[in-house]
Image: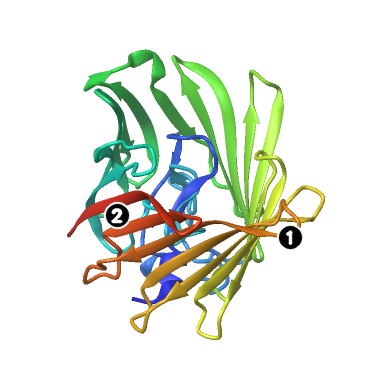
Amino acid sequence: MRKRDILNKIVLLILITTGFLLTSCNSSSEKSVNADDNKQSDTIPGIMDIDIKNPETAGFRYTDWDGVLDERGFDPLNFMYPTGSVKETKVWATGIAKGTEKEHILTKVYDDHRRLVQKKTYYHSDESGWNYIYDDYGRLIIVEETFNGEIVPERQLTYKYLPFDPDKNKVVREVFKQNILIRVETEQIVDNKISLEFDYTDKKTTVTNSLYFENGNIIKHVDVENFKYETNFEYDEHGILIKTIELTSKGKERFIYDFKYNENDNIVEGITNDYRHDPPTIMRTQKAMNHDQHGNWLRKELYEDDILVGLIEREISYY
């Protein structure tokens, strides 16, 4: 599996919030949009298989319900986002340093269109969940929140889409909770840039996050909501992610992540370098192993100061 697929796969979130926005898909077969004529573009890979040529059925093309970059692979070692035609993924964690036993922490379920339909997180004996419901055009219309298997009605979100604006290549949707408008979300693609804007009605604030692409790869992410951080991405000559550089709002290096791969292009190691100190220090090393036939790792070890402190294990099924 090419590492570029790992990179060009996953969600939103960076839009941070948890549990509210976006999907999961393999970008190699998805459509993307040219701002001028709505044709396929090599500059920005699509995630959602949405027909934007029909103004009445157009939906978000890039955003995933877990955040802007769900499955886009800012971090190919992120345990939440395997690549490929995934049906279900389950995740267990063991806190070796803290002496905690192996615990089931996450389950994610996808339909055969590679859309996220259910997510569950676990903390001790409690289970929090989200059900994602789509219309006939593949657009997210309802997010149900559950607790220990019971739906929490007052937490349900509903989405209403406004007609697509072909001149500005922009889609707008309104988000409601208990029939009250809580925010307006706007996704716009211009040239090599995707902007996602959140207009919060209660806070009377607007937050914009932007992604920049080159040759189908993410090269920069500007996260205005999360302390105005900027992250840049570097690739080798084959388009494989080898480094991410996170900058502060003042443009100084904050963290640098270096990635290593084996001869099969499977991620095997990630090193987090902390540039908040002088000289910089290695904050954490992650080692991935036991890759399946799709190139997804099934076991990841976490080290601090060369000491094993944690373990992540995954079980992944496919269509």
Q: Is residue 99 visible?
A: yes
267 with respect to 256 (left or right): left
Report the residue marked by disc 2: 114
User: Where is residue 216 shown, x and y percent of the image?
Assistant: 54, 72
Q: Between residue 244 and residue 45, name the one nearer to us.
A: 244
Q: Dot 2 lies on which element?
A: loop
Crowding at mark 2 (Cα within 10 Å: few <14, some 14-19, many 20+): many
110 with respect to 216 (left or right): left
Query: In the picture shown, does residue 220 fall above or below 157?
Result: below
Q: Residue furthest right?
A: 250
Number of labels in the image equals: 2
User: Where is residue 178 shown, x and y percent of the image?
Assistant: 44, 14
- Identify the amino acid type marked 2: Arg
Q: Between residue 37 and residue 48, name the one nearer to us.
A: 48
- Identify the amino acid type marked 1: Pro
User: Where is residue 304 shown, x and y percent of the image?
Assistant: 48, 53
Image quarter of residue 317: bottom left
Query: In the picture shown, does residue 101 fall above or below 285?
Result: above
Report the residue marked by disc 1: 279
305 with respect to 87 (left or right): right
Query: In the picture shown, does residue 144 fall above or below 49?
Result: above
23 with respect to 270 (left or right): left
Residue at x 48% of width, y 23% of height: 176
